[in-house]
Amino acid sequence: MEVAQTERLLLRWLNTGDSPFILELLNEPSWIRYIGDKGVKTIQDAQRYIEKGPAEMYQRLGFGLYLVELKENGAPIGICGLIKREALLDVDIGFAFLPRFWANGYAFESASAVMSYAKRALGLSRIVAILSQDNDRSAKLLEKLGFRFDSAVRLQPSGELWLYAAAA
């Protein structure tokens, strides 16, 4: 299901046909460093990741992480969307792109579309984001989107994350 469009991008629900892309994205060194190793090593693992993560969240809450594609050719370039974590009161925005698509404004463009969708379609008034303390690129993007540092949080024993917040 299509969620949003921008001038250059289409955001839609992930499905198991996107498994090869998810396998590639989740094994990028930047994903593993800043988000973590999700144990997705095969196409079947990627299918399970989609089914038990984004697809389950779409069914339960009506939102989740979305595939970001280039309009011009349908190429998948990243994911961007909304996540409801048990450990956080608010919905958080997440994004990740293949490095070859960095520095083109796609993360800002897609995250702006997701923020608008969250306010318009879902009625959210506040969105948060979590990131590792050394993820300077994402922190700069969040600030450009209107997020401000809120607090340090610990979602796992492995360490503290920064929590940013913004009005939707």
Image: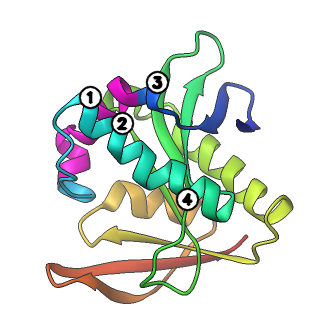
Q: CA distance from mark 1 to mark 3?
A: 10 Å
- Mark 4 and mark 2 lie on one chain; the one further toward the N terminus is 2
What x and y, as percent, mark residue 106?
55, 36
Q: CA distance from mark 3 to mark 4?
A: 17 Å
- Please give the range of residues in magenta: 19-32
Q: Which residue is mark 4?
A: 57
- Mark 3 and mark 4 lie on one chain; the one further toward the N terminus is 3
Q: Which element carries disc 4, helix, strand or loop? A: helix
Q: Which quarter shows the C terminus?
A: bottom right
Q: Assess whether mark 1 and mark 4 are in contact (beta carbons under 8 angstroms).
A: no
Q: Is residue 152 left or right of residue 159?
A: right
Q: Which residue is mark 1?
A: 43
Q: Amino acid at mark 3?
A: Gly
Q: Is residue 141 left or right of residue 91?
A: left
> Which is more toward the observer, 70 or 89?
89
- Mark 1 and mark 3 lie on one chain; the one further toward the N terminus is 3
The residue at the far right in this view is 120
Q: Amino acid at mark 1?
A: Ile
Q: CA distance from mark 4 to mark 1?
A: 20 Å
Q: Amino acid at mark 4?
A: Met
Q: Amino acid at mark 2?
A: Gln
Q: Is residue 147 left or right of residue 36?
A: right
Q: Which quarter shows the N terminus?
A: top right
Image quarter for residue 72? top right
Q: Which residue is mark 2?
A: 47
What mark, if any, has residue 17 been given in the picture? Answer: 3
What mark, if any, has residue 148 been given in the picture? Answer: none
Q: Assess whether mark 2 and mark 3 are in contact (beta carbons under 8 angstroms).
A: no
Q: Assess whether mark 4 and mark 3 are in contact (beta carbons under 8 angstroms).
A: no
Q: CA distance from mark 3 to mark 2?
A: 8 Å
Q: Going 41% across and 64% down the picture, which residue do you hit?
A: 139
- Mark 3 and mark 2 lie on one chain; the one further toward the N terminus is 3
